[in-house]
Amino acid sequence: MNVRRRHISAAALAAVTALGLGGLTACSSDSSAAGNTDKFDVVASFYPMAFLAEQIGGEHVNVTSLTQPGQEPHDLEISAKQTAQLQDSDAALYLKGLQPTVDEAIGQSEVKTKIDAATLTSLESHAAESGGHEDEHAHEEEHGHEDEGHGHDHEHEEGQDPHVWLDPVKYAEVAEGVGKAFEKADPDHAADYKKNTAALVGKLNALDKKFETGLADRRSGVFITTHAAFGHLAERYGLTEEAISGLDPESEPSGARVKELQQTAKADGVTTVFYETLVSDRTAKTLAADAGLRTDVLDPVEGITDDSRGDDYFQVMEANLAALQKALGAK
């Protein structure tokens, strides 16, 4: 659909085709065709953005993701081939602050419609509540963040938490903004985008009610997880997230932090240490073993793999609800 397609060289197109980026659903059955279809071509930064694009775009969009299924999105490095793919698309949908190389690539690209999900809802800082700032700063020093805006520190400048998709209410706000952007960029299909957006928002509102009801009567409100991805979810439902590694899933916790978490677990009746499917579970399982706690999966839904407890966002989120209910003693 993109009129700029004629400016892309044959070599660049061949490179993009060879890349074979992971498409996500029937709307993107041929991922190598990104930017070369008769549909509204959308490049999404990672799964939660691609899911929105597909749900809202329906049959009118061709969606591909810059992040492969099973790849940890925080550490994504954009290749020259992916940059060429981006240049040839109609729209880019991303969440600024989560993947620095994606932010840079989209910022420098000529793609006409750039949709930053971070501007479509409100972001807050949760690292301090999760005890993650000390480890975050240590991680920055260790890796030498000489270049502003680069590296794996995926906080916003104000320390804001970008994991908004784990709060169904905020995710619905993002969906509404994406729908309006699609309507403006592809007005021929605006009515369908509006209808699809309304349907998606309705499902997200229903999910919100399930969480609200399912977590209302609980024995405890404190949970321990690998990294501080669930701050928005915790705030929405009156829970307290204690993260082992702060906002960065790859940073190592200090000995003091581990001891603090052990004390928290004892004081607040924590039964479970949650880990994720896309990052190492070593630290979580060690902490659990030392404190005599169980382990379970709480999925940040950053990608769907064979190990995911569901085939899409809604199924995995309902599995997360069940895991939280069990861990928190919800009735």
Image (cartoon, rainbow, N blue to C red):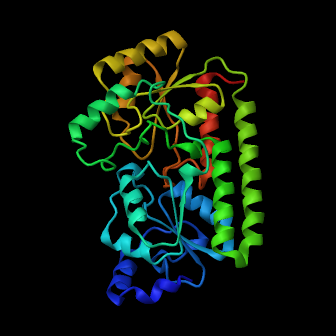
Q: Is residue 304 left or right of residue 18?
A: right
Kindly tell me whether residue 1 is visible in this rendering. Answer: yes
Residue in the image at 45% along x and 67% along y: 22
* Viewer-side residue, 150 vs 230: 150
Task: Residue 164: give x, y in percent of width and height.
Answer: 56, 44
* Residue visible at 68% across and 62% down in the picture: 179
User: Is 41 positioned to the left or the right of 128 in the image?
Assistant: right
Does any portion of residue 285 appear in the rendered image? no
Q: Is residue 315 above or below residue 3?
A: above
Q: Determine whether 280 is above or below 308 in the image.
A: above
Q: Establish if 221 lies above or below 117.
A: above
The picture places residue 279, in percent across and down from the top left corner, at 38, 43
Q: Quadrant where the N terminus lies?
A: bottom right
Q: Position of residue 310 (x, y in %)?
A: 59, 51
Q: Name the residue furthest top.
A: 267
Q: Nearer the viewer, residue 325 or 223?
A: 223
Quadrant assignment, res 262: top left
